[in-house]
Image: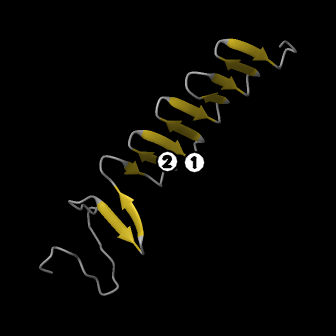
Amino acid sequence: MNDGGIESNGDGIKSNKGGVKLNDGVIKLNGDGITLNGGVIKSNDGGIKLNGDVIKLNGEVIKLHDGFITLNGGVIKPNGEVIKLNGGVIKLNGDGIILNDGGV
């Protein structure tokens, strides 16, 4: 095509190297869009990385900016505050609430 597009007769796009590269970084499928400008979407390892933030579904890790949420480790940390569920510790602004040993 003159505009640099790719047309297929129903066979899709195939590559021996297994990769497709586009200069504008946009892949659209049936109106849904995936934009990769330094961000990465991975499905084989169950992880999604967007703009440096990390969301892992199978690994149960969600990282957003500087705060992070970890489910397997039982830690939720928003804005420097820490909530630990497995360890039974809730800390808010330096104050502690300890549940497992009965102390508050």
Q: Decide if residue 18 is in sight here.
A: no
Quadrant showing the C terminus: top right
Q: Which quarter of the picture shows residue 74?
A: top right
Q: Is residue 90 depicted above or below 36 in this figure? A: above
Where residue 13 appears, as percent x and y from the top left, is 30, 74
Tell me the crowding category of disc 2: few under 14, some 14 to 19, or many 20 or more residues within 10 angstroms, Cα based. Answer: some
Where residue 12 appears, as percent x and y from the top left, is 33, 78
Q: Which quarter of the picture shows residue 97?
A: top right
The answer to whether residue 100 is left or right of residue 12 is right
- Name which residue type carries label 1: Leu
Residue lying at 65% horizontally and 12% vertically, measured from the top left? 94
Do callouts 2 and 1 mark residues in contact (Cβ within 8 Å)? yes
The answer to whether residue 81 is left or right of residue 24 is right
Q: Is residue 64 depicted above or below 57 in this figure? A: above
Which residue is label 2 attached to?
A: 47
Which residue is label 1 attached to?
A: 57
Which element is circle 2 on? strand
